[in-house]
Image (cartoon, rainbow, N blue to C red):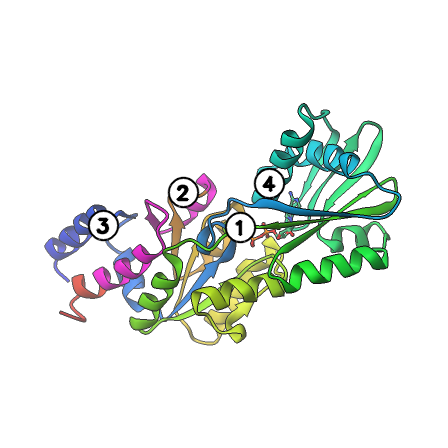
Protein backbone atom coordinates (compact mmCIF):
# COMPACT_ATOMS: atom_id res chain seq x y z
CA UNK A 1 0.00 0.00 0.00
CA UNK A 2 1.08 3.60 -0.54
CA UNK A 3 2.11 5.74 2.45
CA UNK A 4 -1.05 7.75 1.89
CA UNK A 5 -3.24 4.65 2.14
CA UNK A 6 -1.47 3.68 5.37
CA UNK A 7 -2.05 7.15 6.82
CA UNK A 8 -5.70 7.05 5.85
CA UNK A 9 -5.96 3.58 7.39
CA UNK A 10 -4.48 4.61 10.73
CA UNK A 11 -6.60 7.77 10.76
CA UNK A 12 -9.77 5.79 10.09
CA UNK A 13 -8.68 3.42 12.88
CA UNK A 14 -8.56 6.28 15.37
CA UNK A 15 -12.12 7.23 14.39
CA UNK A 16 -13.26 3.66 15.04
CA UNK A 17 -11.59 3.61 18.46
CA UNK A 18 -8.51 1.68 17.36
CA UNK A 19 -5.07 3.04 18.29
CA UNK A 20 -2.42 1.59 15.99
CA UNK A 21 1.24 1.70 17.12
CA UNK A 22 2.54 2.13 13.57
CA UNK A 23 1.47 1.59 9.96
CA UNK A 24 3.49 -1.67 9.78
CA UNK A 25 1.00 -3.21 12.24
CA UNK A 26 -1.66 -3.22 9.51
CA UNK A 27 0.19 -6.05 7.70
CA UNK A 28 0.02 -8.46 10.66
CA UNK A 29 -3.57 -7.37 11.28
CA UNK A 30 -4.48 -8.31 7.72
CA UNK A 31 -2.81 -11.72 7.95
CA UNK A 32 -4.28 -12.98 11.26
CA UNK A 33 -6.16 -16.28 10.89
CA UNK A 34 -6.56 -17.23 14.55
CA UNK A 35 -7.76 -15.01 17.36
CA UNK A 36 -6.97 -15.96 20.94
CA UNK A 37 -9.33 -14.29 23.41
CA UNK A 38 -8.52 -13.93 27.09
CA UNK A 39 -11.64 -14.70 29.13
CA UNK A 40 -11.78 -12.49 32.21
CA UNK A 41 -12.01 -8.79 31.38
CA UNK A 42 -11.86 -9.36 27.62
CA UNK A 43 -14.83 -11.60 26.79
CA UNK A 44 -16.44 -11.04 30.21
CA UNK A 45 -16.84 -7.73 32.06
CA UNK A 46 -14.24 -8.68 34.67
CA UNK A 47 -16.52 -7.29 37.36
CA UNK A 48 -17.14 -10.33 39.54
CA UNK A 49 -19.59 -10.79 42.38
CA UNK A 50 -19.53 -13.18 45.32
CA UNK A 51 -22.57 -15.44 44.93
CA UNK A 52 -22.19 -17.94 47.78
CA UNK A 53 -20.01 -18.99 50.71
CA UNK A 54 -19.78 -22.70 51.67
CA UNK A 55 -18.04 -23.47 54.96
CA UNK A 56 -17.05 -26.60 56.85
CA UNK A 57 -19.27 -27.34 59.84
CA UNK A 58 -16.85 -25.86 62.38
CA UNK A 59 -16.31 -22.64 60.42
CA UNK A 60 -18.09 -19.33 60.88
CA UNK A 61 -18.94 -17.50 57.66
CA UNK A 62 -18.03 -14.13 59.22
CA UNK A 63 -14.50 -15.37 59.94
CA UNK A 64 -14.16 -16.52 56.33
CA UNK A 65 -15.19 -13.13 55.00
CA UNK A 66 -12.99 -11.24 57.46
CA UNK A 67 -9.81 -13.24 56.79
CA UNK A 68 -10.31 -13.75 53.06
CA UNK A 69 -11.57 -10.18 52.58
CA UNK A 70 -8.57 -8.71 54.41
CA UNK A 71 -6.13 -10.51 52.08
CA UNK A 72 -8.05 -9.92 48.87
CA UNK A 73 -8.29 -6.22 49.70
CA UNK A 74 -4.59 -6.04 48.77
CA UNK A 75 -5.04 -7.73 45.36
CA UNK A 76 -6.28 -6.15 42.14
CA UNK A 77 -7.53 -9.42 40.65
CA UNK A 78 -11.24 -9.33 39.66
CA UNK A 79 -11.89 -12.32 41.96
CA UNK A 80 -10.19 -10.48 44.81
CA UNK A 81 -12.24 -7.34 44.28
CA UNK A 82 -15.48 -9.36 44.50
CA UNK A 83 -14.42 -11.02 47.75
CA UNK A 84 -13.11 -7.82 49.35
CA UNK A 85 -16.24 -5.86 48.38
CA UNK A 86 -18.60 -8.52 49.79
CA UNK A 87 -16.55 -8.73 53.00
CA UNK A 88 -16.49 -4.95 53.47
CA UNK A 89 -20.27 -4.83 52.86
CA UNK A 90 -20.95 -7.47 55.46
CA UNK A 91 -18.48 -6.56 58.21
CA UNK A 92 -17.21 -3.05 57.55
CA UNK A 93 -13.55 -2.35 58.20
CA UNK A 94 -11.14 -5.22 57.45
CA UNK A 95 -7.90 -5.94 59.32
CA UNK A 96 -4.61 -5.19 57.53
CA UNK A 97 -2.69 -8.31 56.43
CA UNK A 98 1.02 -8.90 57.10
CA UNK A 99 3.43 -10.73 54.79
CA UNK A 100 0.99 -10.41 51.91
CA UNK A 101 2.00 -12.18 48.70
CA UNK A 102 0.31 -12.53 45.36
CA UNK A 103 0.74 -15.96 43.71
CA UNK A 104 0.06 -15.24 40.02
CA UNK A 105 -2.73 -17.36 38.54
CA UNK A 106 -3.30 -19.14 41.84
CA UNK A 107 -4.32 -16.64 44.51
CA UNK A 108 -3.00 -14.78 47.54
CA UNK A 109 -1.45 -15.60 50.88
CA UNK A 110 -0.62 -13.70 54.08
CA UNK A 111 -1.13 -13.37 57.80
CA UNK A 112 -4.37 -11.87 59.14
CA UNK A 113 -5.11 -11.50 62.86
CA UNK A 114 -2.25 -13.94 63.52
CA UNK A 115 -3.60 -16.63 61.15
CA UNK A 116 -1.69 -17.82 58.07
CA UNK A 117 -4.36 -17.49 55.35
CA UNK A 118 -4.53 -18.76 51.76
CA UNK A 119 -7.19 -17.73 49.23
CA UNK A 120 -7.23 -19.07 45.70
CA UNK A 121 -7.35 -22.13 43.49
CA UNK A 122 -7.27 -25.60 44.99
CA UNK A 123 -3.75 -25.97 43.53
CA UNK A 124 -2.55 -23.30 45.97
CA UNK A 125 -3.61 -25.55 48.88
CA UNK A 126 -1.96 -28.54 47.29
CA UNK A 127 1.33 -26.63 47.26
CA UNK A 128 0.98 -26.34 51.03
CA UNK A 129 0.08 -30.05 51.35
CA UNK A 130 -3.51 -29.30 52.34
CA UNK A 131 -6.53 -31.21 51.06
CA UNK A 132 -10.08 -30.10 50.49
CA UNK A 133 -12.54 -31.91 52.80
CA UNK A 134 -15.25 -33.83 50.91
CA UNK A 135 -18.11 -31.41 51.71
CA UNK A 136 -16.10 -28.52 50.26
CA UNK A 137 -15.03 -30.65 47.30
CA UNK A 138 -18.72 -31.24 46.52
CA UNK A 139 -19.51 -27.52 46.79
CA UNK A 140 -16.58 -26.70 44.51
CA UNK A 141 -17.60 -29.25 41.87
CA UNK A 142 -21.21 -28.03 41.90
CA UNK A 143 -20.12 -24.39 41.55
CA UNK A 144 -17.80 -25.19 38.65
CA UNK A 145 -20.37 -27.29 36.79
CA UNK A 146 -22.65 -24.26 37.04
CA UNK A 147 -19.97 -22.27 35.21
CA UNK A 148 -18.73 -20.37 38.25
CA UNK A 149 -15.27 -19.87 39.68
CA UNK A 150 -14.70 -21.67 43.01
CA UNK A 151 -12.12 -20.17 45.35
CA UNK A 152 -10.81 -22.00 48.40
CA UNK A 153 -10.11 -20.31 51.75
CA UNK A 154 -7.75 -21.96 54.23
CA UNK A 155 -6.08 -20.86 57.45
CA UNK A 156 -3.83 -22.44 60.05
CA UNK A 157 -3.26 -25.45 57.82
CA UNK A 158 -6.91 -26.31 57.11
CA UNK A 159 -9.28 -25.64 54.21
CA UNK A 160 -12.35 -23.93 55.70
CA UNK A 161 -14.52 -22.60 52.89
CA UNK A 162 -15.31 -22.41 49.20
CA UNK A 163 -16.39 -19.09 47.70
CA UNK A 164 -18.43 -18.97 44.48
CA UNK A 165 -17.79 -16.00 42.22
CA UNK A 166 -18.88 -15.19 38.68
CA UNK A 167 -18.94 -12.34 36.21
CA UNK A 168 -21.02 -11.78 33.11
CA UNK A 169 -20.22 -12.06 29.42
CA UNK A 170 -20.10 -8.57 27.84
CA UNK A 171 -23.22 -7.90 25.80
CA UNK A 172 -21.08 -7.27 22.74
CA UNK A 173 -19.01 -10.48 22.92
CA UNK A 174 -21.28 -12.94 21.02
CA UNK A 175 -21.59 -10.45 18.14
CA UNK A 176 -17.80 -9.91 18.21
CA UNK A 177 -17.15 -13.66 17.87
CA UNK A 178 -19.64 -13.88 14.98
CA UNK A 179 -17.89 -11.01 13.18
CA UNK A 180 -14.42 -12.48 13.70
CA UNK A 181 -15.65 -15.81 12.32
CA UNK A 182 -17.28 -14.07 9.35
CA UNK A 183 -13.81 -12.69 8.52
CA UNK A 184 -12.49 -16.24 8.46
CA UNK A 185 -10.71 -16.24 11.83
CA UNK A 186 -10.78 -19.16 14.27
CA UNK A 187 -11.62 -17.95 17.80
CA UNK A 188 -9.86 -19.61 20.76
CA UNK A 189 -10.71 -18.90 24.42
CA UNK A 190 -7.72 -18.81 26.79
CA UNK A 191 -7.96 -18.56 30.58
CA UNK A 192 -6.45 -19.41 33.94
CA UNK A 193 -9.91 -20.21 35.21
CA UNK A 194 -11.39 -23.72 35.52
CA UNK A 195 -12.49 -25.62 32.41
CA UNK A 196 -16.21 -25.72 33.26
CA UNK A 197 -16.41 -21.95 33.81
CA UNK A 198 -14.43 -21.40 30.61
CA UNK A 199 -16.70 -23.72 28.59
CA UNK A 200 -19.80 -22.00 29.95
CA UNK A 201 -18.50 -18.63 28.71
CA UNK A 202 -17.44 -20.20 25.40
CA UNK A 203 -20.95 -21.61 24.86
CA UNK A 204 -22.46 -18.21 25.54
CA UNK A 205 -20.34 -16.48 22.90
CA UNK A 206 -20.30 -19.30 20.33
CA UNK A 207 -16.84 -20.85 20.72
CA UNK A 208 -16.55 -24.66 20.48
CA UNK A 209 -15.34 -26.56 23.60
CA UNK A 210 -12.38 -27.87 21.54
CA UNK A 211 -11.22 -24.28 21.15
CA UNK A 212 -11.14 -23.65 24.91
CA UNK A 213 -7.73 -23.65 26.61
CA UNK A 214 -8.33 -23.45 30.38
CA UNK A 215 -6.37 -23.64 33.63
CA UNK A 216 -3.33 -22.04 32.01
CA UNK A 217 -0.95 -20.31 34.43
CA UNK A 218 -0.14 -16.67 33.57
CA UNK A 219 3.45 -17.49 32.58
CA UNK A 220 2.22 -20.28 30.27
CA UNK A 221 -0.15 -18.16 28.17
CA UNK A 222 2.77 -17.16 25.96
CA UNK A 223 3.51 -20.86 25.25
CA UNK A 224 -0.04 -21.37 24.02
CA UNK A 225 0.51 -18.58 21.48
CA UNK A 226 3.87 -20.11 20.45
CA UNK A 227 2.28 -23.54 20.02
CA UNK A 228 -0.42 -22.13 17.71
CA UNK A 229 2.26 -20.28 15.74
CA UNK A 230 4.18 -23.56 15.53
CA UNK A 231 1.13 -25.00 13.73
CA UNK A 232 1.68 -22.33 11.09
CA UNK A 233 -1.08 -20.03 12.25
CA UNK A 234 -0.90 -16.27 12.30
CA UNK A 235 -2.12 -15.43 15.78
CA UNK A 236 -3.94 -12.35 17.00
CA UNK A 237 -4.29 -12.22 20.78
CA UNK A 238 -6.75 -10.00 22.64
CA UNK A 239 -6.17 -9.39 26.34
CA UNK A 240 -6.47 -6.91 29.16
CA UNK A 241 -4.42 -8.16 32.09
CA UNK A 242 -0.87 -7.99 33.37
CA UNK A 243 -1.04 -11.77 32.85
CA UNK A 244 -1.63 -11.29 29.14
CA UNK A 245 1.30 -8.96 28.40
CA UNK A 246 3.86 -11.60 27.37
CA UNK A 247 1.32 -13.40 25.16
CA UNK A 248 0.31 -10.09 23.55
CA UNK A 249 3.95 -9.39 22.75
CA UNK A 250 4.52 -12.91 21.37
CA UNK A 251 1.42 -12.89 19.16
CA UNK A 252 1.77 -11.84 15.53
CA UNK A 253 -0.76 -9.17 16.46
CA UNK A 254 -1.43 -8.07 20.04
CA UNK A 255 -4.72 -6.29 20.70
CA UNK A 256 -5.07 -4.69 24.14
CA UNK A 257 -8.35 -3.67 25.72
CA UNK A 258 -8.19 0.08 26.38
CA UNK A 259 -10.04 -0.65 29.63
CA UNK A 260 -7.26 -3.01 30.72
CA UNK A 261 -3.92 -2.65 32.48
CA UNK A 262 -1.04 -0.43 31.30
CA UNK A 263 1.14 -3.54 30.93
CA UNK A 264 -1.25 -5.01 28.36
CA UNK A 265 -1.56 -1.72 26.48
CA UNK A 266 2.22 -1.35 26.30
CA UNK A 267 2.66 -4.92 25.05
CA UNK A 268 -0.04 -4.67 22.35
CA UNK A 269 0.31 -3.48 18.74
CA UNK A 270 -3.23 -2.14 18.76
CA UNK A 271 -5.48 -0.77 21.47
CA UNK A 272 -9.25 -1.19 21.37
CA UNK A 273 -9.95 2.11 23.11
CA UNK A 274 -13.44 1.38 24.46
CA UNK A 275 -12.76 -2.23 25.38
CA UNK A 276 -15.36 -3.34 22.83
CA UNK A 277 -14.34 -6.70 21.33
CA UNK A 278 -16.42 -6.05 18.17
CA UNK A 279 -13.85 -3.42 17.23
CA UNK A 280 -11.24 -6.22 16.89
CA UNK A 281 -13.18 -7.34 13.81
CA UNK A 282 -13.35 -3.73 12.56
CA UNK A 283 -9.56 -3.53 12.88
CA UNK A 284 -9.05 -6.62 10.73
CA UNK A 285 -11.53 -5.44 8.11
CA UNK A 286 -9.85 -2.02 8.05
CA UNK A 287 -6.38 -3.54 7.59
CA UNK A 288 -7.56 -5.74 4.72
CA UNK A 289 -9.24 -2.81 3.05
CA UNK A 290 -6.26 -0.48 3.55
CA UNK A 291 -3.85 -3.04 2.14
CA UNK A 292 -6.18 -3.68 -0.74
CA UNK A 293 -7.08 -7.33 -0.21
CA UNK A 294 -10.81 -6.56 -0.14
CA UNK A 295 -12.87 -3.69 -1.41
P1 LIG B 1 -7.77 -15.19 33.63
O1 LIG B 1 -6.84 -15.92 32.70
O2 LIG B 1 -9.18 -15.64 33.42
O3 LIG B 1 -7.65 -13.68 33.49
P2 LIG B 1 -6.02 -15.54 36.02
O4 LIG B 1 -4.88 -16.28 35.38
O5 LIG B 1 -5.74 -14.14 36.45
O6 LIG B 1 -7.38 -15.62 35.15
O7 LIG B 1 -6.44 -16.36 37.31
C1 LIG B 1 -6.76 -17.72 37.20
C2 LIG B 1 -7.49 -18.22 38.40
O8 LIG B 1 -6.64 -18.11 39.59
C3 LIG B 1 -8.74 -17.42 38.76
O9 LIG B 1 -9.85 -17.87 38.03
C4 LIG B 1 -8.86 -17.73 40.23
O10 LIG B 1 -9.45 -19.01 40.38
C5 LIG B 1 -7.42 -17.82 40.72
N1 LIG B 1 -6.95 -16.55 41.30
C6 LIG B 1 -6.06 -15.68 40.77
N2 LIG B 1 -5.86 -14.61 41.58
C7 LIG B 1 -6.69 -14.80 42.64
C8 LIG B 1 -6.98 -14.05 43.84
N3 LIG B 1 -6.39 -12.89 44.12
N4 LIG B 1 -7.86 -14.58 44.70
C9 LIG B 1 -8.47 -15.75 44.43
N5 LIG B 1 -8.25 -16.49 43.35
C10 LIG B 1 -7.38 -16.04 42.46
MG1 LIG C 1 -8.07 -10.95 31.76
**Mark 3 Cα shell of 10 Å, populated few (<14), some (14-19), many (≥20):** some
Apparent side of residue 33 relative to residue 125 in the rendered image (left or right) = left
Q: Which mark is residue 82?
A: 4
Label 3 secondary element: helix
Placement of 26 over or under 199, stated as above or below: above
Using the image as rendered, state which of residue 249 and residue 120 is in the foreground. 120
C-alpha span from label 1 to label 2: 16 Å
Q: Examine the structure image and report whether residue 141 is included in the region drawn in magenta.
A: no
Residue at left 50%, top 57%?
Answer: 39
Label 4 secondary element: helix
C-alpha span from label 2 to label 4: 18 Å
Q: Which mark is residue 63?
A: none
Q: Which circle, 1 or 2, is nearer the viewer?
A: 1
Q: Which mark is residue 259?
A: 2
Residue at left 55%, top 67%?
Answer: 199
C-alpha span from label 2 to label 3: 16 Å
Q: Which mark sits nearer the N-terminus, 1 or 2?
A: 1
Q: Which mark sits nearer the N-terminus, 3 or 1?
A: 3
Placement of 195 over or under 49, stated as above or below: below
Q: Which residues are magenta?
A: 261-287
Residue with the mark numbered 3: 16
Residue with the mark numbered 1: 167
Amino acid sequence: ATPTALMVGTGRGAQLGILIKGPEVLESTRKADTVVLDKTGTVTTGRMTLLAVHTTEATDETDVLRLAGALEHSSEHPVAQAVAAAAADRIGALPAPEDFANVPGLGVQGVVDGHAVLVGREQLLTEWAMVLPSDLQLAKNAAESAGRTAIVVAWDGEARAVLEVADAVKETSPEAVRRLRALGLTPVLLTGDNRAAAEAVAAEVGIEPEQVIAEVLPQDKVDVVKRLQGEGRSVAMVGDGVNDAAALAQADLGLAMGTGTDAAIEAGDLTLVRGDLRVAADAIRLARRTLGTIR
